[in-house]
Image (cartoon, grey):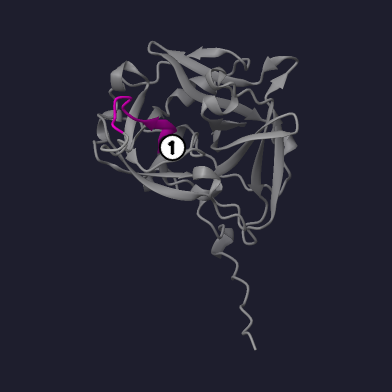
Amino acid sequence: MPVPIPAPAPPPSGRPLAEPLLLSTVRISTFLGQQSLTAATGFFFERGPRLFLVTSRHVVFDEASDHLPDRIEITMHTDTVNLTRTVTLSILLYKNGKADWRQGRDSGGEIDVAVIEIDRTALPRSALLYCYGPANLQPELAAIGVGTTLLLPGFPLGFYDTVHHLPVVRHAAIASSFGVRFQGQGYFLTDARTHRGSSGAPVVMRDESAGARMPWRLLGVHSARMDMGTRDLEQDESLGLNCAWYADVLLTLTKDAAPGGAAQAPAGAV
C-alpha cells in the first residue's frame, strides 16, 4: 500500500514556498492572432506605483527574422504554497495601431531591451508579484569584477517545471570588463551555457544589501549568444559567450513617457 505523502507545510511568516528570484521571472509566449510563435523569458520591474514587464526587444519585434507578434501571454502564480495555481495574462503589443512597448537606443545603436507597462488593475488580487526596482540596480559599475558569479533564471528551449510553472537557473560569470561597453555597444559579456528561450532573462548577482524581499543586484538583461562566423563547426566548439545589456537602461525606459518610441538611453557604462 503506498504511503501518503503529507502536503508541504505553509512557509514561515507568509514567505513563498519558492524563492522570489523564481517568482519574479515569467515565461513569455508570443502570438500572431491565435497562432503560437515563440517562447522567451521576462521579469518584473517596479518604478514607484508603475509595473513593467521586461524582456528582449527581439521577443516582441524582430524585423530581420520576420518575427512580428501582436500579443504575448505570461503565467503568474496566485498562491504562495500551492504553486500549481496560476493565472495567464494576455497582453496586446499594439494599441490603436501603435506599439505599446518602449525600446531604446544609445550612441552605439539599438538596445535589445523592451519594457511593457502592466495595468495593475488587470491583475487578480491574488497574483504574486516579486519585482526588481531602482534599488536593485548596481550603483557603482567599477565595483563588479570580471569573473563575478551570476545567475540567469529562465526557460531555455522552453524547458521548465511545467507542474509548478517555475524557471530553471543557469550559472554564469562576467566575461568582459564590467562597465566598459563591449565593442562600443551597451552590453557586457557573460560566460554561460544558454539556449533559445532564455532571451529576456534577468542577469543577477546575489547581494543581501539590495533588500530583504529581493536580495539581488540586477546587472543586465540577457539577449543572445555570441559566436564567431569563421568558426570551424567540426573542429571548434562554440565560444559559450553571451551579451547582456546593462540593466541601468531600465531607468530611462521606465520614465514617464508615451510607449512605442525609442528612448535615448545613456546606459551608464563608459
Q: Residue at x 54, y 51 (%)?
A: 160
Residue 23 within the magenta-colored segment of the rendering: no
Quarter of the image with the N terminus in it: bottom right
Could you tell me which secondary element the residue under label 1 belongs to? helix
Q: Is residue 168 left or right of residue 116?
A: left
Q: Position of residue 83 (x, y in %)?
A: 63, 58
From this viewpoint, which residue is outermost toward the front? Answer: 234
Whether residue 117 is situated above or below residue 154 in the rendered picture: above
- The residue stretch that appears in magenta: 218-232
Give the overall secondary structure of the magenta segment: strand
Q: Residue at x 30, y 29 (%)?
A: 141
| Nearest the eye: 150 or 258 | 150
Q: Position of residue 108 (x, y in %)?
A: 38, 13
Residue 227 within the magenta-colored segment of the rendering: yes
Q: Quadrant of residue 222?
A: top left
Q: Residue at x 60, y 15 (%)?
A: 257
Q: Quadrant of residue 72?
A: top right
Q: Residue at x 33, y 30 (%)?
A: 227
Q: Quadrant of residue 179?
A: top left
| Nearest the eye: 224 or 79 | 224
The residue under label 1 is which amino acid type? Asn
Q: Which residue is mark 1?
A: 136
Whether residue 162 is situated above or below residue 121 in the rendered picture: below
Q: Position of residue 86 (x, y in %)?
A: 68, 51
Whether residue 171 is situated above or below residue 46 in the rendered picture: below
